[in-house]
Image (cartoon, rainbow, N blue to C red):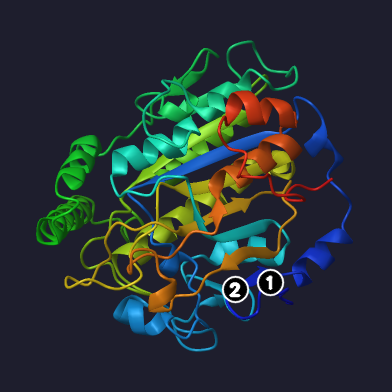
Amino acid sequence: MHAYHVDKARRRFLLSTGALAASAALPHVLFARTGGSARLVVMILRGALDGLAAVPPYADPNYAGLHRTLAIAAPGVADGALALDNTFGLHPSFAFLYERYLAGELVVFHAVASPYRDRSHFDGQNVLENGLTKPVGSADGWLNRALAALPRGTGRPGERAVAISQNVPLILRGDTPVISKSPQATPDVDEDLLARLADLYSKDDWFSARLSEAVQTEKLADERSTQADAPAMTAPPAAPDRVGGVARMAAALMRSEGGPEVAVIEASGWDTHANQGGAKGALAQRLTGLDKALRALKDELGPLWQQTAVLVVTEFGRTAAVNGTQGTDHGTGGCALLAGGAVRGGRVIADWPGLARTALLDNRDLRPTLDLRSVFKAVLDEHMRVDAKTLASRIFPDSSGARPLQGLIRA
């Protein structure tokens, strides 16, 4: 892998090209640009994923000292990162995603964030989903606005998008009709209530840690109870959020005759204030579940995977330093993923600011250098064929500073 440098004194723009060169030799997926054939899945990880654990910058000289017991070791040692290039790796739980990276079907973005700069889950998710710079001011979502601008599709009118959720999330709300499908199994714990409690205590590290501990203890007890009630099971599920079943449900709908072209999947449980763990532990189990869900999505989509792009995003990152309860608190910059057979992958895109104390935002967070809307615009433009004027004026107003990236989708 090679890296290109921008302003060597401070930042490096990392664009891994080895896998990209290999993928360029493969036949282009021409139907990814054909109106009505492209498929888009947006997976929202609610609770704020720790991007420094999911995509560890193992070669940053300040990483291990800040993340300490939560830091993922460099590649080549037990439980070390899966090397993407000479700076970044994937968490060792991401076996499937690593396969996709090597196959040229995964782009990893780092030091990325929405325009939101505070630390409320609900406000952060609103900005992530409404496509604006503020959490209020719009009752519809950027993906719903984009649906109205899609080329004519092959599916049934009003059923071009589906939310696998109890309720239609903000990202899909708006004037364009969509459908929603409730997962067959729903969590016993009221995730909305837990998120509201987390927001209420977000500025109190002690209460945040206690709440996170209580939630993890409850879920662990539920898993053990399930094992006791079903002794024939040889092992518990890799993650308790059932996202794998939701992913399979979304894929089955999308591959059905006249099925939706766009799907939104939600996965909760990423608010790791306490006992987060490093290569193993609570977060690692979540990441394993996410990785298996993405594998299930690919398997269930079958040949349709070659026409598909999957965006994995979260409302904000987490603090660079570990806290007193062996977790991380609400932060700013984090990571995002773009996977799929339609993706021109095998790359890490990061204008990396570094983790030196003087480089951190507010002396605590990874400083974001890439606006998530630049990724959203690129996918909608190149993959879903939404024109640039509509993107700038209707879908992402006030986003002139977030220029769309180029070349994320196979031509």
Q: Could you say which is closer to the camera, residue 62 or residue 312?
A: 62
Q: Quadrant of the C terminus?
A: top right
Q: Quadrant of residue 337?
A: bottom right
Q: Position of residue 120 (x, y in %)?
A: 28, 45
Residue 181: % across, % down: 43, 24
Q: Residue at x 28, y 65 (%)?
A: 328
- Closer to the chain start, of discs 2 and 1, is 1
Badge 2: how crowded within 10 Å, few (<14), some, or many (20+)? some
Q: Tell me if residue 210 comes above or below residue 126 in the rendering.
A: below
Question: Is 188 positioned to the left or the right of 89 in the image?
Answer: left
Q: Quadrant of residue 377?
A: top right
Q: Answer left or right for 41 relative to 196.
A: right
Considering the numbered disc 2 on the image, is that residue within a helix, a strand or a loop?
Answer: loop
Residue 384, how many percent across, how many down? 71, 32
For residue 6, the mark is 1
- The residue wearing badge 2 is 11
From the viewer's perspective, is 389 left or right of 77?
Answer: right
Query: Dot 1, crowdedness within 10 Å: few (<14), some or many (≥20)?
Result: few
Q: What amino acid does circle 1 point to?
A: Val
Query: Element type at marker 1?
Result: loop
Indicate the position of residue 89 as horizontal and vertical percent values: 55, 73
Task: Find the distance from the CA under tag 2 to the CA under tag 1.
Answer: 6 Å
Q: Residue at x 80, y 48 (%)?
A: 410
Q: Is residue 261 visible?
A: no
Q: Name which residue type carries label 2.
A: Arg
User: Label 1 near label 2: C-beta < 8 Å?
Assistant: yes
Question: Looking at the image, is 378 positioned above or below residue 259?
Answer: below
Which of 236 and 63 lies nearest the eye of the viewer?
63
